[in-house]
Amino acid sequence: MDNLNVTWLSCPTMTSTPEILVGQTLVLSTADPATAQHDSRGAVLIADGKVQAVGPAGDIRRAHPDVPVTDHRDRLILPGFIDAHVHYPQTAIIASWGKRLIDWLNTYTFPEEMRFGDPDYAEEIAARFFDISLGNGTTTVATYCTSHPESVTAFFTEAERRGVRAIAGKTCMDRNAPEALLDTAARAYDESKALIAAWHGRGRLGYAITPRFTPTSTDEQLHALGALWAEHPDCLMQTHLSEQTDEIAWVRELCPDARDYLDTYEAAGLLGPGGLFGHAIHLTDREKDRLRETGAALIHCPTSNTFIGSGLFDMSLARTHRVGLATDTGGGSSFSMLRTMAAAYEIAQLRGQSLHPAELLWLATGASAAALGQQHRVGQLKPGMEADLVVLDLASTPAIKQRADRADTIWETVFPTIMMGDDRAIHAVYVAGNRV
Ligand code: GUN
Ligand code: ZN
């Protein structure tokens, strides 16, 4: 599997004054705990928006005696979390009761998304979304917008204002949704193309061509977006794949000639290393093979999969496929990547797999960065990376503290926060070296 390396997101000039952050450091370069480096008194030197050095606090302080120090004491410094699949327009309808996928879309999602033709509303929700996701330690997202170009403009404008690295796209739909949300094949192509020209590669922003999923895109629209991707191969492409069995049966009815669900995308030119396939739960062997051969990424959305009753993602695919982790808010029931890691752990347990805390943390950072082709910029704590960081309080509630207090290893110390933590565990967040 080739390592996707998306080069388009240039690093803008980032200004942040030099600072040394002291705390526990945990450096992961893979999901394997044997390769992790933990320092109970570590430090991270940040300057110019980037990580300049990571090492023992004493060494870093001696080497840079004039640089101001922020001592986070025994809190844990990690790369900021990366949410590889989210729907910012669904912020206000998170935790809506009692439906499965298609009913949930029709009952809650589409009526809410219809409101995003109003730029004021889109701006309000984009700001609210960043407040909540940054408050949960998430510093990079790949989001769906709505079919309104205004919703994309509102999102990117807010991301740029806050200086965050973000990926987004206009959600294209030309069938099986309310009239007010439908575009056409030509409009999907034209509007997406104009948004790419306006936003892709601007500062820390990147564009993902975004057909919602086959049930809401005709073959003509999928082909138009495949052609657009061929013209802009350095964009990402995000969509949904095989989330629920009813959805797969519907795709079979809509596309009787396709070999399987993935084939509806593949035939349209929408399968490749920059492809992000949300959910990917009920896959055939052929689909798994093609996803691996093409280097596409599977995005695991565990709280969504339990909340809307979709199924149990097979984490053993991470051995052979590129796999990222995501909230899928508002199908997902949490904005927290801690809660999302916990749900990934629980789903794996139901499949007889036990994910190590290192695997969970890697999924939410380095693996999600790699899924988005951003592994050379974010997702790891090492020199040269952009200084998007989260500082975790590992004793944020009495229940977590009493368990962490009797831990012997860093893994035992961090696991209660992964399983029981929420935004109270987020002590500090840095975006491009600036505390937010
Ligand atoms: N499939 C198509 N659209 C959506 C969506 O908005 N959320 C989820 N979870 N699945 C989808
Ligand atoms: Zn989704």
Image: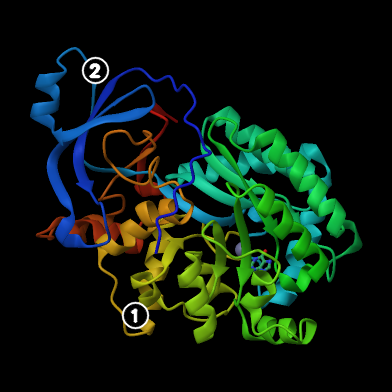
Q: Position of residue 181 (x, y in %)?
A: 84, 58
Ligand 2 contact, mark 2 (Cβ < 8 Å): no
Q: Is residue 413 at all visible to an observer of this figure?
A: yes
The quadrant in which the N terminus is found is bottom left
Q: Which residue is mark 2?
A: 68
Residue 286 drawn at (x, y percent): 53, 83
Along the line of sight, the residue nearer the viewer: 94 or 314: 314
| Quadrant of the rendering where the C terminus is positioned | top left
Q: Does 199 appear above or below 237?
A: above
The residue under the point 65% across, 79% down is 261
Looking at the rendered structure, the secondary structure element under dot 2 is loop
Choose between 60 and 412: the one closer to the eye.
60
Q: Residues within 10 Å of mark 2 (few under 14, many from 20)?
A: some
Name the foreground residue: 131 vs 182.
182
Image label count:
2
Percent of width and height locating residue 188: 80, 53
Q: In which quadrant of this rendering is ligand 1 seen?
A: bottom right
Give residue 429's quadrant in the image.
top left
Q: Position of residue 104 (x, y in %)?
A: 71, 72
- Residue 95 appears anywhere in the view: no
Q: Residue at x 23, y 42 (%)?
A: 75
Q: Amino acid at mark 1?
A: Gln
Q: Residue flagged by tag 2: what amino acid is it? A: Pro
Q: Quadrant of residue 137?
A: top left
Q: Earlier in the sequence, mark 1 or mark 2?
A: 2
Q: Residues within 10 Å of mark 1 (few under 14, many from 20)?
A: few
Q: Is residue 271 left or right of residue 20?
A: right
Q: Secondary structure at mark 1?
A: helix
Q: Which residue is mark 1?
A: 349
Tell whether label 2 touches label 1 (CB within 8 Å).
no
Q: CA distance from mark 1 to mark 2?
A: 44 Å
User: What residue lies at 72% left-to-right and 52% top-to-bottom?
Assistant: 228
